[in-house]
Image (tube, rainbow, N blue to C red):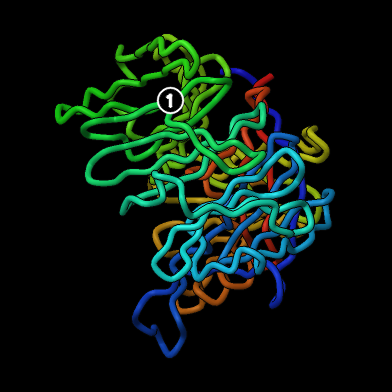
């Protein structure tokens, strides 16, 4: 197994007039208290110039440095609903929204002013059931839509908003496509579960496919292309990230069961058989010896918080507190577990990674204080 480096990239605090905490509750009350199911991290976007953005509940913030961000104004789009958006090279956005019955594509400057707005594009005249804006690292911008079981990828001219069709899927269009380094990537699904990873050069039209075992069976968990032509896969229920190389073989696997923060330190929990191995990181360096917490046979046990050398492990609806030597200090009574989670729980979304041009992975997490971003690099 290769060595992984964890780096704290930045954070944004929850604010009533800015980025807001998103908590999923159960529909029933338990002992008069709302039951927390999960804290949902915001979506993370990366512009072609490296600028990072977070979006949640219709709010968009742009990170300025590690601990500050500004709210990006979207009012100039004059849309009733924002469907999808993508950053541009000049720290602005391209936004697809709905205005009454119309689909509207708008480019906004870095200060939120309208550069152009288009309603007349042919792809916008169709009744699409799905739409997603995509950005390549070179600044190119694309719109992928599915309508009447047909898929269409168009390239958007950022000067005037005009568009030209690049790729069409005449039947069974993929639900997700990605653009990277001038190529389009997607998964062709098989009812037998033997899926295929496909890439197509957008200039030459040449295709390349990967359908060799063993990872063909989990390609439905693809999260995006890696620089080597392979893919990053995620199995959220098991907390696993898998790096697939250009031959379709596994090059790295990370069974992550927790990635939380304490101040500017990161606390990383990795599943190792029936134990959890915990390390602390700061500025991309390990700052304390790894230790193990025994024994968890449950596949859902996870590290949810760390406070002053106390580590909170949630396992089968029970909450346990351990010290830095792996000794159990306390077990939270079940009816207080939810209250303790609301105060502390940190949760990283491995199914929402951003892959940088270098191949490093950005993950976004959320805890009671705000959202935070972590970079994973294979050394």
Which residue is located at x 46 percent, y 20 percent? 244
In the picture, measured across the screen, residue 38 lies left or right of residue 378, that is: left
Q: Quadrant of the C terminus?
A: top right
Relative height, residue 118 to residue 331 (above, below): above
Q: Answer few, some or many: residues within 10 Å of disc 1's Cα (few below 14, many 20 plus, some between 14 and 19).
A: many
Residue at x-position 59% and y-position 69%: 78
Which quarter of the image is occupied by the N terminus?
top right
Residue 111 makes an appearance in the image = yes
Task: Return the residue found at the far front.
Answer: 120
Q: Would you identify the image quadrant in which residue 363 lies? A: top right
Q: Nearer the viewer, residue 169 or 115?
A: 115
Residue under pointer 1: 185
Q: Residue at x 38, y 43 (%)?
A: 145
Residue 333: x, y in percent?
Answer: 49, 74
Instruction: Say what secondary structure mark 1 lies in.
Output: strand
The answer to which image quadrant residue 42 occupies is bottom right
Q: Is residue 200 above or below residue 107?
A: above
Q: Position of residue 261 (x, y in %)?
A: 71, 52
Q: Residue furthest bottom?
A: 32
């Amino acid at each position: 197994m290769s060595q992984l480096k964890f780096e704290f990239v930045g954070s944004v605090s929850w604010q009533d007039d800015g980025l807001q905490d998103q908590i999923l509750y159960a529909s029933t009350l338990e002992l008069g208290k709302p039951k927390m199911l999960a804290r949902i991290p915001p979506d993370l976007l990366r512009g072609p110039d490296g600028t990072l953005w977070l979006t949640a509940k219709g709010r968009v913030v742009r990170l300025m440095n590690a601990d500050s961000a500004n709210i990006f104004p979207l009012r100039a789009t004059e849309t009733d609903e924002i469907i999808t958006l993508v950053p541009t090279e000049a720290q602005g956005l391209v936004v697809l929204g709905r205005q009454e019955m119309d689909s509207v594509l708008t480019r906004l400057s870095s200060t939120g002013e309208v550069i152009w707005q288009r309603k007349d594009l042919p792809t916008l005249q169709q009744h699409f059931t799905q739409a997603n804006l995509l950005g390549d690292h070179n600044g190119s911008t694309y719109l992928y839509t599915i309508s009447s079981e047909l898929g269409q990828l168009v390239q958007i001219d950022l000067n005037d908003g005009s568009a030209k069709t690049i790729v069409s899927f005449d039947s069974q269009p993929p639900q997700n496509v990605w653009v990277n380094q001038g190529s389009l990537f997607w998964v062709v699904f098989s009812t037998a579960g033997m899926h295929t990873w496909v890439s197509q050069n957008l200039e030459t039209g040449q295709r390349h496919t990967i359908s060799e075992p063993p990872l063909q069976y989990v390609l439905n968990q693809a999260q995006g292309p890696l620089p080597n032509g392979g893919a990053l896969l995620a199995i959220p229920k098991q907390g696993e990230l898998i790096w697939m190389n250009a031959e379709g073989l596994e090059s790295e696997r990370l069974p992550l069961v927790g990635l939380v923060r304490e101040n500017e330190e990161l606390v990383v929990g990795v599943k190792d058989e029936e134990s959890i191995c915990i390390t602390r990181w700061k500025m991309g360096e390990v700052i304390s010896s790894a230790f193990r917490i025994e024994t968890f046979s449950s596949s859902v046990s996870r590290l949810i918080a760390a406070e002053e050398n106390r580590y909170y492990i949630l396992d089968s609806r029970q909450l346990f507190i351990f010290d830095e030597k792996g000794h159990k200090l306390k077990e939270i009574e079940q009816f207080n577990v939810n209250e303790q989670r609301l105060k502390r729980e940190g949760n990283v979304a491995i199914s929402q990674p951003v892959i940088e041009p270098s191949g490093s992975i950005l993950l976004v997490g959320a805890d009671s204080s705000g959202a935070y971003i972590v970079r994973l690099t294979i050394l």
